[in-house]
Amino acid sequence: MTDTTPLPLSADPRACIAAAHALGIPRDYGRTRGLRRMREPERLVRVGRDTQGRDQYLAALAARAWARMRVAAAQDGVELEIVSAFRSVEYQLGIIRRKLERGQSIEAILRVSAAPGYSEHHSGRALDLTTPGFAPLEQEFERSAAFAWLRKNAQLYKFTLSYPRDNPHGIAYEPWHWCFHEKRRADLS
């Protein structure tokens, strides 16, 4: 964790959400999926580089918890790498547009990506993780020692697996997606 910095957030998240509706995302998406809108934080903390060498950011409390969790994993011989962290609502809208341009249906997209405004990445608390020897953002990650370590230890740092198999949100199983929940009790004894 190095610096706290304001990042360019979505210029107008409401405009991005309206644009998402124009692309075919249902207006009742949040209600029908059991998801709530995520607010972008005002400040973010740089937490290192992702697997592509890009700077990544989290909200301050999540950044501190991530730093502790990553060190603990390393002490147990497990290397955790960031695939992605904070994403603005505007960036999420771009993901949806690119997938539509490649010919994917909005229904197929929403099975693997949360709609703009509803992604936990907007909150600055979510991480997509991988480990050496495993392809990023693939279910094979569940066979890694890193995933086993996270299943056993992530809750100690207030991180939880957001999209397990058959989750109620209708989002595909994502063993790589972990979100920090400040109000969860961490049992560090």
Image (spheres, rainbow, N blue to C red):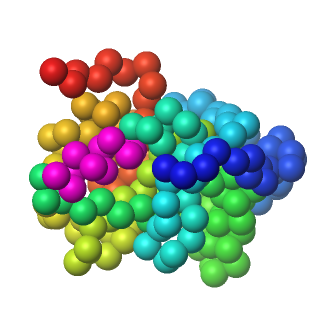
Tell me which residue sits at (83%, 41%) in the image: 14
The image shows residue 64 at horizontal and vertical percentages of: 44, 38
Residue occupying the far bottom of the picture? 102
Front residue of 138 and 71: 71
The image shows residue 10 at horizontal and vertical percentages of: 79, 50
Front residue of 5 and 8: 5
Residue 39 visible here: yes
How many dots with numbers? 0
Residue occupying the far front of the picture? 2
User: The C terminus lies in which quarter of the figure?
Assistant: top left
Tell me which residue sits at (80%, 44%) in the image: 13
The answer to whether residue 121 is left or right of residue 155 is: right
Q: Name the image quarter holding residue 122.
A: top right
Q: Which residues are magenta?
A: 66-75
Tell me which residue sits at (57%, 65%) in the image: 55
The answer to whether residue 65 is left or right of residue 104 is: left
The answer to whether residue 64 is magenta is no
The image shows residue 33 at horizontal and vertical percentages of: 52, 37
Vertical position of residue 43 compared to residue 109: above or below: above
Vertical position of residue 33 compared to residue 51: above or below: above
Tell me which residue sits at (12%, 52%) in the image: 76
Residue 166 visible here: no
Q: Name the image quarter holding residue 183.
A: top left
Vertical position of residue 156 compared to residue 187: above or below: below
The image shows residue 120 at horizontal and vertical percentages of: 54, 43
The answer to whether residue 12 is left or right of residue 135 is: right
Q: Main secondary structure of the magenta part?
A: helix
